[in-house]
Amino acid sequence: MIVPGGGISLDGTRWIGCRPNYLLPVKVLSRLFRRLMLEMLLAAHDAGRLQFFGDHAHLAGKAAFNAYLAPLHRTKWFVYSKRPFAGPEQVLAYLSRYTHRVAISNSRLIAADATGVTFSYKDYRIEGPGRYKTMTLKPDEFMRRFLMHVLPNGFHRIRHCGLLAGGTKTETLARIRELIASVAPVQTAHQPQPPDRAPATDQATHPCPCCGGRMNIIETFNRGSTPQYRPPPPTVIRIDAS
């Protein structure tokens, strides 16, 4: 699943960027995975799909199995999640090689006749030029392996929704680029002035109660109303593929 790092506001007038690390809160995922894993274990035990032998034969009883899993509800579980080393662009390039091609490319086909199909493949267990080998399969076996990569009826390799929905994708992407480009000048408009540029005799009209420094007013609104200003979003759409 690829999720854009932001979206268009409800009134359609601005792009709202996401916060850093918005997509995969690892601690929340850890607790979620723990709950789902334990629930599936209990369901499998109730359905009789688990078998126990030797020292664990007593876990066939429901009470004993529940008591065995009870400490795991309080144990911290960890989900390993990290950012891609080469960035989101390389992730998209990697996925595209699987979503926009068939099981085998034409360049790997060497020969084909009534007796068999010969093609090249890569043996990842071997390093060096020797990893590139050839294989010949009977036509029916080649077709069987090829059809294993064909999706059944009713399944789609890629589904587009939201901002990339097929019916409005072209107009939506054009509008997103327009909104992102329009906020670029705003990023510098609300940045505080560096101290060395402030006049020496300038008295802070609205001093910070903590440090005494100048506080810049970015918006004034009436009591009870909702402020309109939001932190400037990034100038590009980020995709978190951790």
Image (cartoon, helix red, strand yellow):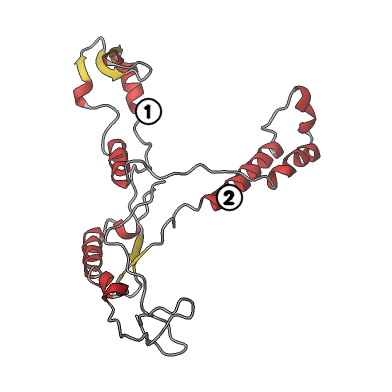
Q: Classify 64 as above or below 138.
A: below
Q: Which residue is mark 1?
A: 148
Tags 2 and 1 in contact by the CB under 8 Å rule?
no
Quadrant hosting residue 132: top left
The answer for how far apart the CA atoms under marks 2 and 1 are is 32 Å
Residue nearest the observer in this picture, 186 or 112: 186
Q: Residue furthest front?
A: 200
User: x%, y% of residue 237?
Assistant: 30, 57
Q: Which residue is mark 2?
A: 32
Query: Is residue 44 among what the camera can see?
Result: yes
Question: Which residue does the image show at 66% across and 32% down from the upper left?
Answer: 49
Total count of labels: 2
Q: Secondary structure at mark 2?
A: helix
Q: Residue furthest top?
A: 115
Q: Secondary structure at mark 1?
A: loop
Q: Amino acid at mark 1?
A: Met
Q: Amino acid at mark 2?
A: Leu
Question: Which residue does the image show at 26% across and 15% down from the upper left?
Answer: 129
